Amino acid sequence: MTPTSFARRIGVLASVLLLLSGACGAGAADAANTGSEPQYLMFQLFTASPAVTTEPGTHVLSKLPDPGFLDGESKKILDTVGERGDSLHRLGVIVGPVALDYTDAQMRTLIERTFAIASKYKIAVGLHIDDSKFWTNRRDLWSNPENVEWLDWNRTPNTGQYLNWGEQWKLAPQACFNSPAMLNEARRIAGQVIGPAVAEQVAKLRKTGDEGLFGGVIVGWETAIGRDFDTRRDLGYCALTNLGFSQKEPPRDPDGALESVVQNWIETWSKGLVDAGVGGEKIYSHIGFKSKKQFEEEGAKGGSYARSVMYTPPSVAFGATHRPGFSTYPDPNIFGDIYAALNGQGNPPWASSEGTNVDIQTAPFSIPSEGMQDYLARMFNHGATMANVFGWDIGDRDNLFRRATENDEALAAYRKFLEGAPLDEKPLAESYQSGPSLLQRRLRALQGLIERFRRSGGDLYLIQPHMQQLEEDMKEGRLDAVSRELDVIEATIGRPGP
């Protein structure tokens, strides 16, 4: 059996596992709220939906969403949840992406319409800025090779950003984050357009005693130095050149250099907002990353960990003029990495800038048996001041993200939080780690282990009969037998690290 056939079989087994029975056992461990600062349960309202297509090269935000859309969705959320919360637990909506594709006037209008929701329905509001993905309209910037990332030291421009959010998208080119023109434009938009407009609206809320209805501004839409669309190659040579490096004199630590470029780009936006009067305690970054555990399980493909997360390890989320924010989907290793990073920085308040209770680390995606209450507790019981939930009213009723976000258990969890009751959670080490969930994660890791075993000279035929038995056990739903067979295979080829 070839490595390819092994990989194919593992993928099939992982998918079959989801069809077996299997709600994992419930259980809870209480955790206290985090003090007197308000916590915001927000729902993302997407401005992109009416205007962005999925045809390569046509991702353009050319018009604002209809005012009735924002108003109607906000009212629907309030009516369905049925609770506004109190001064420490607030329901709200986040509007975005506020993207470079929009004109200055459109950005100001969108901000005004967003804050009108707070005044009308007395729920919290916030903005979600996209700093570099949706900027097809800004040909004045990206048509200049000095403002886009290069594939090599020869200044070859990238062909477009590769993005896969369930399907492959080709976006405008990846920006060069330390290009002087790009930095100036970030300062201008943040400091002269978005920042002043937000500050003006917050001042109006302050006059009516409603300042607490401002949830904040999220800077970035998983900010990263992405990959080239045509070749999938890593980028960053423009940024490194601007730092003074070259092919003859490359950086000793290219990963660290590019991480600092991303971090400075986020800081440029947040500082512009602060300089315009938006409080830094109301500004959050937004990065996404795979856990170090998953990177190791995959056999460290593609080089370093920093490269695998497009130069956004958890440390990049922190800055002097904003709070850290992360994409958070239910994965114990992701949460563990976030908690470790927060602890290393003195445990500042933070945000889940994107997420919902959908496990996107498995194939196919699934809703864990641990419900929305457990998911929200991963943030709110651990110092988060905002959770921005994705999935509300997205697609049809069968959409997985929508089902996770709108089901009855999720609605009950929202109400429990807004009523100020403690959220229950299982210990992190026990979460998403029993029954089918654990077995699927072991299967996901198996491909990397087999490849590592093969590269070291191991004989794949040693495990072939066990793979065949594993498949039979899967088809018959014998989960205990599946676990025992995995024990044998892992003992033969080596287990994943701790």
Image: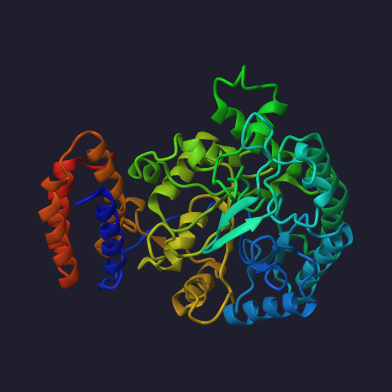
The structure residue drawn at horizontal position 69% and vertical position 47%, both measured from the top left corner, is 281
Question: In this rendering, would 346 be left or right of 13?
Answer: right
Query: Up-down: is 110 above or below 322?
Result: below
Residue 129, position as x, y percentages in the image: 72, 55
Q: Quadrant of residue 393?
A: bottom right
Residue 343 in view? no
Query: Up-down: is 315 above or below 364?
Result: above
- Asked which colour scheme the image uses, the reply is rainbow
Residue 182, position as x, y percentages in the image: 78, 41
The structure residue drawn at horizontal position 40% and vertical position 42%, both measured from the top left corner, is 295
The structure residue drawn at horizontal position 37% and vertical position 43%, both measured from the top left corner, is 293
* Residue 323 vs residue 247, the one in the foreground: 247
Query: Looking at the image, how many numbered discs can be counted on the residues?
Result: 0
Residue 386, position as x, y percentages in the image: 60, 57
Residue 458 in view? yes
Q: Quadrant of the C terminus?
A: top left
Question: In this rendering, would 360 be left or right of 316?
Answer: left
Question: In this rendering, would 338 be left or right of 428?
Answer: right
Residue 376, position as x, y percentages in the image: 49, 61
The structure residue drawn at horizontal position 45% and vertical position 67%, both measured from the top left corner, is 372
